[in-house]
Image (cartoon, rainbow, N blue to C red):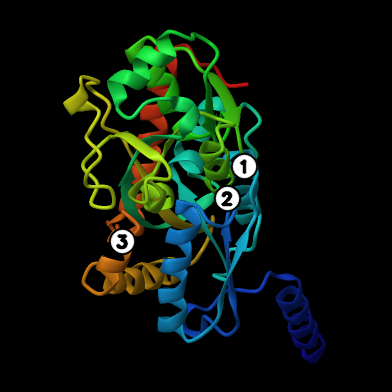
């Protein structure tokens, strides 16, 4: 009887050692957290992510270290998050590109934008803005469109690569206006701005959180926005200039690897909601031209799934196939 009991105890101990560590939400966090931003520093995704993570760090009392892992329209950094342990110590900043548009363009996407992640919260949304530099040779949208039509297939248009929502919407813009431009891919928006200002590329469909300051300083021209933007209040909408049904927005969110304990996801969401749904946090986010949303994990998961289907339908209409 004693031998059997001893064997049972030893077997239980061995099983405990072999089993993966269970994350206890009541002891989290006990060490620094990393947050992967899948684009370079200086753009809207980086700025929004850093603002959110600063708030999270202050509320939790631990360091939240932001790591930029750019490449492939945000899919490289997102894959790092997908493959991390779901222990609450790796988070990622998701976007409309990395978690909604990417499946439209890539057959070899190394993660499922919904199943590979725990949705934590949608941080907020921002408009798109069509910006340009000196080689655009225009100060308003009608003139720009006329100039590009006069040079079909010759005007370089920057994008963050063919797995991004900006690229998809640029294709839609070309279709509805009858334009044809040269796609010029970059790793991040911060790398595009100098090339816009020096004339290497002519235009880009961006979000104002990264480029609004340059537009206000007249270093870049803002031709149109998909919705009115407090960051660039003097830039008219596409609709007001005759380009209709072009009102889409870009979103940012926080995700974690699939399997994150729901208590941790809910705690992060509540911290960020408390920090950004009222001033001064709300004002800080709006200063980046991001309208705070702070959805629940369940709401954000639904948004990601719905948007993926919506952009797939748009790509089908445009005749764009995954490569």
The residue carrying pointer 1 sits among few (fewer than 14), some (14 to 19) or many (20 or more) residues within 10 Å by Cα, namely some
Q: Measure the C-alpha gap from mark 3 to mark 2.
A: 20 Å
Quarter holding the N terminus is bottom right
The answer to whether residue 301 is visible is no
Residue plotted at (22% across, 73% down)? 279
Q: Measure the C-alpha gap from mark 1 to mark 2.
A: 7 Å
Q: Assign a secondary structure to mark 1.
A: loop
The residue that label 2 is drawn on is: 39
The residue that label 3 is drawn on is: 287
In this rendering, the count of numbered labels is 3
In the image shown, does 74 or 223 lie closer to the viewer? 223
Question: Which callout, 1 or 2, points at the residue further toward the start of the chain?
Answer: 2
Q: Is residue 187 left or right of residue 255?
A: right
Q: Position of residue 320 (x, y in %)?
A: 50, 16
- In the picture, the disc for residue 187 is 1
Question: Which callout, 3 or 2, points at the residue further toward the start of the chain?
Answer: 2
- The picture quadrant where one finds residue 73 is top right
Q: Is residue 27 left or right of residue 143?
A: right
Q: Is residue 241 left or right of residue 129?
A: left
In the image shown, does 82 or 218 lie closer to the viewer? 218
Vertical placement of residue 109 versus 61, above or below? above
The residue carrying pointer 2 sits among few (fewer than 14), some (14 to 19) or many (20 or more) residues within 10 Å by Cα, namely many
């Amino acid at each position: 009887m004693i031998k059997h009991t001893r064997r049972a105890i030893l077997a239980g101990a061995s099983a405990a050692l072999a089993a993966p560590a269970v994350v206890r939400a009541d002891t989290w966090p006990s060490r620094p957290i990393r947050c992967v931003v899948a684009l370079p520093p200086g753009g809207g995704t980086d700025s929004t992510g850093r603002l959110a993570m600063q708030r999270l760090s202050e509320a939790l009392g631990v360091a939240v270290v932001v790591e930029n892992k750019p490449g492939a329209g945000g899919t490289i950094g997102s894959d790092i998050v997908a493959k991390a342990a779901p222990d609450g110590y790796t988070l990622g900043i998701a976007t409309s590109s990395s978690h909604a548009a990417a499946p439209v363009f890539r057959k070899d996407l190394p993660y499922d934008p919904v199943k590979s992640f725990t949705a934590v919260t949608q941080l907020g949304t921002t408009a798109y803005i069509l910006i340009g530099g000196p080689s655009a040779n225009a100060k308003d949208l009608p003139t720009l469109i006329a100039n590009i039509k006069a040079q079909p297939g010759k005007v370089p248009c920057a994008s963050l690569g063919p797995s991004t929502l900006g690229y998809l919407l640029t294709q839609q813009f070309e279709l509805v206006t009858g334009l044809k431009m040269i796609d010029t891919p970059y790793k991040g928006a911060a790398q595009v701005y100098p090339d816009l200002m020096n004339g290497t590329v002519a235009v880009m469909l961006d979000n104002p959180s990264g480029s609004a300051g340059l537009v206000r300083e007249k270093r870049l021209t803002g031709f149109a926005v998909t919705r009115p933007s407090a960051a660039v209040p003097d830039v008219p909408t596409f609709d007001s200039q005759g380009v209709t049904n072009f009102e889409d927005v870009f979103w940012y969110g926080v995700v974690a690897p699939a399997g994150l304990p729901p208590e941790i996801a809910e705690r992060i969401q509540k911290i960020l909601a408390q920090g950004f749904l009222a001033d001064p946090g709300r004002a800080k986010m709006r200063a980046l031209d991001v309208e705070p949303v702070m959805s629940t994990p369940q709401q954000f998961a639904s948004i990601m799934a719905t948007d993926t289907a919506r952009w797939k339908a748009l790509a089908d209409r445009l005749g764009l196939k995954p490569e």
